[in-house]
Amino acid sequence: MERVVVGAAIVDPEGRLLAAQRAEPPELAGGWEFPGGKVDPGEDDHAALVRECEEELGVLIEVGERIGGDWPLSGGYVLRVWLAAIVRGEPEAKEHLALRWLAMDELDDVTWLPADLPIVHAVRDRLGED
């Protein structure tokens, strides 16, 4: 059975990307990531992504285009990331230490978790900014 984690590359109307700072586990705390989480049994990827963003950020998102394929994670998991837009609500750090909106030229201003870093570059390439 596939072990899937989904992530949302949430972009606002000004073209800024939402980054979320991990609170746990201790070995990942303080690193920056895309909001999201594990897909529950019987749940599809899009439904999991919408649910996770509602739980973690208190927002309703619209899922857009997928970024890349399956990005490998430790523990036999794969990460799947989609572009997304907020359709309702303002993001709050419910399960994270902090949230930051980053312009494309600010993406290197935070310390991304190693698993998320190649996706950050793919998002930058996809959005046409370098």
Image: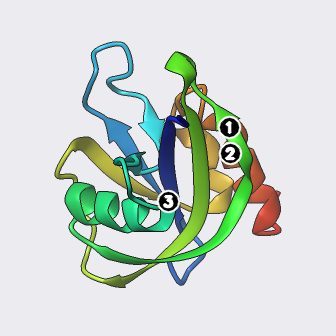
Residue that badge 1 annotates = 71
Viewer-side residue, 108 vs 86: 86
Residue 56 appears in the picture as rendered: yes
Quarter of the image for the C terminus: give it. bottom right
Pinpoint residue 87: horizontal percent, then vertical percent: 38, 86
Q: How many marks?
A: 3
Pinpoint residue 67: horizontal percent, then vertical percent: 71, 58
Tell me the mark number nearer the camera, choosing from 1 and 2. 1
- Colour mapping used in the image: rainbow
Q: Is residue 94 left or right of residue 39?
A: left
Q: Which mark is residue 6?
A: none
Q: Secondary structure at mark 1?
A: strand
Check disc 1: other Cα within 10 Å, few if <14, some if 14-19, many if 20+.
Answer: some
Residue type at the position of mark 3: Asp
Q: CA distance from mark 3 to mark 1?
A: 14 Å
Residue type at the position of mark 1: Trp
Q: Residue furthest left?
A: 94
Q: Earlier in the sequence, mark 3 or mark 1?
A: 3
Q: Is residue 31 left or right of residue 23?
A: right
The answer to whether residue 61 is above or below residue 16 is below
Residue that badge 2 annotates = 119
Residue type at the position of mark 2: Ile
Q: Which mark is residue 45?
A: 3
Q: Is residue 77 left or right of residue 65?
A: left
Tell me the mark number nearer the camera, choosing from 2 and 3. 3
Pinpoint residue 52: horizontal percent, then vertical percent: 31, 57
Check disc 3: other Cα within 10 Å, few if <14, some if 14-19, many if 20+.
Answer: some
Which residue is at a point 50% across and 17% down the rendered structure image?
75
Viewer-side residue, 46 vs 95: 46
Tell me the mark number nearer the camera, choosing from 3 and 1. 3
